[in-house]
Amino acid sequence: MVEKEKEKMENKNTCIGNKREAPLFAWPWENLNNFKACILYLLYGPWVAKVVYAIYREEFNFKNSDSFWCFHILILFGLRALIHQLWSVYSNMLFLNRARRIYQQGVEFNQIDAEWHWDNYLILQAIVASLIYLSFPSLANLPMWDTRGVLCCLVLHIGISEPLYYWIHRLLHSSTLFQQYHWLHHSSKVINPFTAGHATFLEHILLCTVVLFPTLGTILFGYGSIGLMYSYLLAFDFLRCLGHSNVEVFPSKVFEAIPLLQYIIYTPTYHSLHHIDMRTNFCLFMPLYDKLWNTINTKSWDLQREISSRTNSRVPDFVFLVHVVDVFSAMHAPFVFRSFSSIPFSIKPFLIPMWPFTFIVMLVMWVKSKTFVYSFYNLRGKLHQSWAVPRFGFQYFLPFAAEGINNHIEDAILKADKIGVKVISLAALNKNEALNGGGTLFVNKHPNLKVRVVHGNTLTAAVILHEIPKNVDEVFLTGSTSKLGRAIALYLAQRKVKVLMLTLATERFIKIQKEAPMECQKYLVQVTKYQAAEHCKTWIIGKWTTPREQYFAPSGTHFHQFVVPPVIPFRRDCTYGKLAAMRLPDDVEGLGSCEYTMGRGAVHACHAGGVVHFLEGWKHNEVGAINVDQIDVVWEAALKHGLKPL
């Protein structure tokens, strides 16, 4: 019901929001983009330096310092931002709350970009707080706590802020003001905690007024305190994030036991209905005012009861079974930093201080965690999910960890089979030949599986092979006896391309050579040293290659690669390809995170291979050795379904 009504409202509002020239629409520092933090540094940097110097000289008085107020503003700024971040973490933890999500769609890249500067209002309120302090220096003498101020603040909030916000909100939904201002907030298709701050400059000026009545009013009555400022502002942001969390957190039994609560506190479902039916549910936090002025959505509490009582979520049609690469990449998860996960992974300075904490989480996952839902998107009405095995890349190379990892993978396959998943695709080391024979271990152990198990490497081979120019008549191949190396070598030999296969395993080379047609076997040549390729300008890297080994390639060489992690691009006179990948079809929906180092909308070729297997409805398992005859078949199928090479 929620999804259908939401779609109707989106269609209705597609033509709204073309009047960005309205006065006070844009933020004064909008053109600064990510450099807007300079505003805070310029405003508070000198004051912070002064206080630090005073502390160093032992001249700092915590009660009477003229500079201590700036610390409160900065601390509040950080704590308020942290509240939004923690709510974002919770709302994106699909393994905890996917059954109680209100909108089932995912947040897409364009919405993430639009909400990127959600924290503008925190800068605005920090500036307003500074101006107020400069106007009333006596604020420096506020006590840490005054219990009378709590009652006074509540009275002012309920009596002034709540009705004031209600009528401001209703006015913003009038035809003119909505088309000039408020459309921006409602342009977010799937609300989330950062949507709470996504609005125009004018709207947040008005919100500042709403916040000022209880805080400044309590101070003017003589009951103000520093503790009250913290409590009110943090509670205000907490409740705003709660309403925009897109996860129902209240059990319906609470409202059944105490019916009065329905008018005292709103719920995420209650506010989400406002984003569906914009004629209802205008309140700030208290539905009482919607009741007084007859704007409560009649479905509010029935829908809240329905969503809060859900125990099962929608069954995915396709699952991509991934694992964590390393400690740094673990912080690229959508439920850690949403904005960071929406761009290709690379190590950023802000990740370094978080490394110890993430390392501890890794140890806990090793001992306690089970496979969990990581991310999702929709494609042509079908739900595609990524599930994560709670293991990091290095653990796959520990002999004593192999059995435990295989148990996790097996449990995921059996769970997928039980709930009705059509295809489960194994990512990266989850299909390691030495670990489980590229998935054959599970298929042989459970011959009656209804879910199709896929390693996706057929499409990986196809992507690599179609990157090689057609006029190439010789290639140098490392990792040549691996699953992918074997398939690439046999495919190229059949097209009369000479393949220099680097391997010391003569027996394995001969076995592969005999798989080729008799007339093509001569195109497969075993070499044992990198020097053998000093005149070959097409290298296909399937095994880690050091800078010194790359040195033997002639100038102008292009390095194709299927090795994880990719080789270091050492040679400036050569070019380096990226890992095999394809771009998902244009009609993918709800995609808002990047797959490791892949660009937006791009996925590793093995992921794409699983998607193609599902879209084609193939009934066979794709495990073990690659069927060379299927490489072109899978490639054509991928193009037919709208997947594109990068």
Image (cartoon, rainbow, N blue to C red):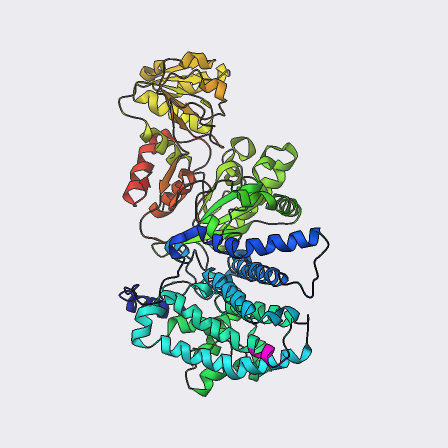
User: From this viewpoint, is residue 410 visible?
Assistant: no
Q: Foreground residue, 207 or 90?
A: 207
Q: Foreground residue, 329 or 373?
A: 329
What residue is rendered at 49% in x and 80% in y? 162
Where is residue 236 drawn, in percent x and y?
Answer: 54, 70
What residue is rendered at 29% in x and 69% in y? 12
Q: Quadrant of the N terminus?
A: bottom left
Where is residue 230 drawn, in percent x and y?
Answer: 61, 68
What residue is rendered at 39% in x and 40% in y? 609
Which residues make up the magenta segment? Answer: 217-222
SS majority, magenta: helix
Extreme bottom residue here?
292
Image position of 445 with respect to 251: above or below: above
- Residue 221 lies in the magenta stretch: yes
Where is residue 519 drawn, in percent x and y?
Answer: 31, 15
Q: Foreground residue, 400 or 202?
A: 202
Where is residue 35 drawn, in percent x and y?
Answer: 45, 50
User: From this viewpoint, is residue 183 visible?
Assistant: yes
Q: Foreground residue, 104 or 632?
A: 104
Image position of 13 with respect to 552: above or below: below
Horizontally, residue 246 falls left or right of residue 78, namely left
Extreme right residue here?
58
Quadrant of res 81: bottom right
What residue is rendered at 48% in x and 46% in y? 449
- Residue 205 lies in the magenta stretch: no
Total tally of numbered discs in the picture: 0
Q: Quadrant of the C terminus?
A: top left
